[in-house]
Image: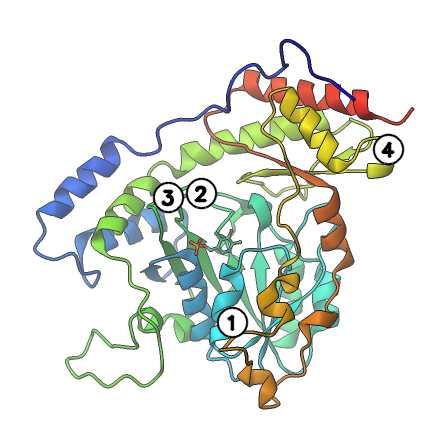
Amino acid sequence: MSTAQSCPIVNEPVPSLPRWGDVELQRLTAMVHQKSLFYWNAPQNAALQEEFRKHYPLKHLFATSSGSAALHVAIASLRLKPGDEVIVSPLTDMGSLIGILFQQGVPVFTDIDPQTFNSDPEGVLRAITPRTRAIMAVHLAGNPCDMSALNTIAREHGLAVVEDCAQSWGARHQGTPVGLLGDISCYSFNDFKHLSCGDGGIVGTNRDDLGNGLSKWGDKCYDRTTSTRDPEDLAANYRMGEPLAAVAAAQLTRLDSIVARRVRNGTRLTKQLGDIPGLHPPRTRSGDTHSYWFYLFRLELSAFRTSREEFAEALRQQGVAANPGYLPMPVYRYKVFRHHNFFGGTWPARDLGATTMDYTKVRCPVAEEILSDCITLPINEAMTDAYIDKVARAVRHVADACRRT
Ligand SMILES: *Cc1c(COP(=O)(O)O)cnc(C)c1O
């Protein structure tokens, strides 16, 4: 089948804007004149915290070398025992899981909601055992999790809620920014996220019991407030140096404008795709704000005579930068999980009897179905209303051409 035309509906490349400029340059210039680029009591890390707090007024903060590092620090602050369980979505980045596994914890995957693509609270509730310590809320693509429901479950069962906000800068749940809703939250500045310093992250909490000495969990457990060196726990070095902090601090001054435009673009696209038969845009709960890191929609494959791959190819012929799928498989199907290959081909937590988890037996049917019928589109702050309208027109055109009659 061919929907190719001499002139595709989207007749321009994906728009882009410069991401760094004068603000970053000013901070980097100031930094070059510093005597030290070490993070402790340094001006760029302080500026990063100050800028961050304008959006997320969290009491205790620590900037890290990556979002994965921020999540590892958050998990380390919970002081898991081997075999302790953390409930998490199977549609996420390895960064959500690395810290849990290094702390000898057990990621427990529960299924997601077919419309929001985030953890289904009922599945979370069913997965709770006496070993459960925390729920990790991954706000996928910028769509906030049902934090009201997750927090209620956590309170009733004495669990901590770790928010993975790597994809959700600027997103809000019932008006409150994500990251201010759980017990401890983590963000990423990797190059693909809303904000970038190349690689970096930040972790923050209002809880003193987790936050006092938060930096120790990413600074070899050194206590920089005393002159004696006597670490009492095992911790990695995940510090963010001043060059990256300078860029990250500057990037945060762009957060509101970047997010405003992405919210506008994503909302506009969702409105226009919403009434196309057989096509399901992401559902955002009423009162929530999706900050659209990328755009994922689902196809009701029985409504079309094409495969998902052919549908995406037809979109590409109309100039839409569509990709068939998101992750190639849910995280629990990755080799590292299927082989329980976490430490040199072994998994001490299981081999020594602290857990009976078998990842070859895990199934999350909704997550698997979504990965088999979804299409992802880029969305960014450089796109204009006119560009979004062209994308929407192209999707409608392709859907009409591919629909089973
Ligand atoms: C990007 C990402 C991470 C990890 O961030 P890095 O900075 O790449 O380490 C963690 N969780 C999610 C959901 C992400 O998208």
Residue mark closest to the camera, 4 vs 1: 4
Residue 255 found in image quarter: top left
Viewport quadrant of the N terminus: top right
Q: In the image, what residue type sits under mark 3?
A: Ser
In space, the residues marked 4 and 3 are separated at their CA atoms by 40 Å
Mark 2 in CB contact with mark 3 (< 8 angstroms): yes
Q: Is residue 100 above or below residue 398?
A: below
The number of callouts visible is 4
Question: What residue lies at 42% left-to-right and 57% top-to-bottom?
Answer: 67
Q: Which mark is residue 192?
A: 2
Please tell me which residue lies in front, 88 or 5.
5
CA–CA distance in space, label 1 to label 2: 23 Å
Disc 2 residue: CB within 8 Å of ligand 1 = yes
Question: What amino acid type should be assigned to the residue bearing mark 4?
Answer: Ala
Q: Quadrant of the C terminus?
A: top right
In the rendered structure, which disc, 4 or 3, sits on the residue that comes first in sequence? 3
What is the number of the mark on residue 142? none
Marks 4 and 1 in Cβ contact (< 8 Å): no
